[in-house]
Amino acid sequence: MSANLDGFIAAAPRPQRAAMKLLLALACRPRGAALLARLPLAQQLARSLIALGLYDEPSVARALGWDADAVVARGRELRRAEGRP
Amino acid sequence: MAHVPARGGRMRVHAGERRLDADFCVVGAGAGGAVAAAELAEGGARVVVLEQGPWHDPNTFTARPPQMLGRLYRDGGQTLTLGSPPILLPLGRGLGGTTLVNSGTCFRTPPHVLERWARDFGLELDGQSMDACFERVERALSVATVTPQLAGANAGVARRGAERLGWSHGYLRRNARGCVGSGVCVYGCPTSAKQHTGITYIPRARAAGALIETGADVREVVVQGRRARGVVARDDRGRRLRVRAPAVILACGTIHTPVLMDASGIPDPSGQRGRNLSLHPATAALALMDEVVEMARGVPQSFFVDEFAQHGIMLETIAGPPAYVAASLPLDGAAHAAAMARYRELAQIGLMVSDASCGRVQSLRGRPLIRYDLDEVDVAKFRTGLGRIEQLFDAAGARDLKLLGFHPLGTARAHASAAGGVTDGDLAVHGVRGLYIADGSVVPSALGVNPQLTIMALATRLALSLLSGESAAVVSQPSQERSPCPS
């Protein structure tokens, strides 16, 4: 799990935090995944979480044309050049 | 800029308790609180603003969704309603409140909504008086219409479909200055182009002498003898902080204002507090196009279709980076990977419903418990709206359509009668002198459009009314010249 996804989960209210950790733990194990397959909503939530982390990885996102570091660098440059807050 | 000493912050320490005296204590620094604080401070009042969240330095913005959700949003953006279906409520936390993390869309309150408020709630918010407040806010926030170039190709898809179908549409008005279309308004604008209240009204309030305390968790509004006397809070170091003020403005937001009022034991003679919650529930649809869209290049929310607004359905483009799309795609395994491999060709349109459904906020051990069930009327609006999006995408040349799935208002609604609402039309809490509310909780019904401008205009109207009206007696210094905003 990426540090960013870790932070996202840590910021959640306690019930959601526990539920997300459980879903991720289940999704990573064959028997857990089989259990999730019988719970479509829980399975969808687990997959959404995994996808959020995976597609946030810079190399994966860059391959799809999204470079967060470049967006941030351009923002910093504009703020510096124009004296924005 | 000359340094102006904080007039709202005559601080003393008494028996380990920090004490501040002010004319106005404003709780919350979002759309309502920041606006009220700046107007009052510039009018000569001593103002203390207590904000629970921090100041977010734009240098820490990373344009990466999970990280920014965890930092900028209350509960990491995972505030959830209980009911059918459960709905996520993205609420900002920090100087700027939800204006820090919204898309920046600015609509004035529609005239038919103001007419309904007058008819059903006895609120005399005529167009002329509100217009003056809207103009004042729009000037402060540099509100302007998005250009087609800046709107990006995602808006271009929606425009093409709307034009072919002959549907009413347009580019949205936004509070942005020097925007370059970074595509991440809701994850912290990296260019500080979005004019959220944390970089507009809060600096103005501070420059006019207001004291801004971040990390201040207000525990109680002190009311004695049916009169507000101030608040008690914990500061960012856990110390007890008491602000003594003859006027308190609650601006904690629709979800948290009723919870704080409950915690403070403030009477609720109407029984309306926490009730009448509307949310503007929303969903979105993605479509695979035969062209490169690159939805995150440009302003994510930049174009609207209001053809069905009279039926409570508003379509607005929305967009985001791959992580955002990947998390919301309702596909599995290979199908998900295949769709994401064509992320560049995905277009997205959101659907917002002006809800008739009614929820409730209650306090559970000091935390809000939000109940909300979507009723059949609103479910029907979603079915209709999704059908309209499909038509729009078809007309724009979409090859495939995948469906996936917000503005809390009304929990301290304004009503001319003390039996019908929590505040009166001037946003004064019925039955408690010196206590006011300036956030979405006073908005008595769904608007059908994004609400930030309505909240800001109401806060402006409240502040100017306090400075010029009966409450002027609590202002310690004479008002400076200001443009009129008749109440």
Image (tube, rainbow, N blue to C red):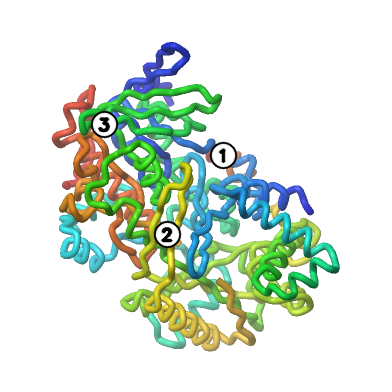
The kind of residue tagged 1 is His
Circle 2 — which element?
loop
| Disc 1: which residue | B56
- Can you say whether B211 is above or below B256 in the image? above
Earlier-in-chain disc, 1 versus 2? 1
Mark 1–mark 2 Cα distance, whole angstroms, equals 22 Å
Identified at 43% across, 68% down, the residue is B373
Q: Nearer the viewer, mark 1 or mark 2?
A: 2
Which chain's residue wears label 3? B
Q: Are marks 1 and 2 in contact (CB under 8 Å)?
A: no
The kind of residue tagged 2 is His
What is the number of the mark on residue B350?
none
Circle 1 — which element?
loop
What is the number of the mark on residue B407?
2
| Disc 3: which residue | B228
Mark 1–mark 3 Cα distance, whole angstroms, equals 31 Å
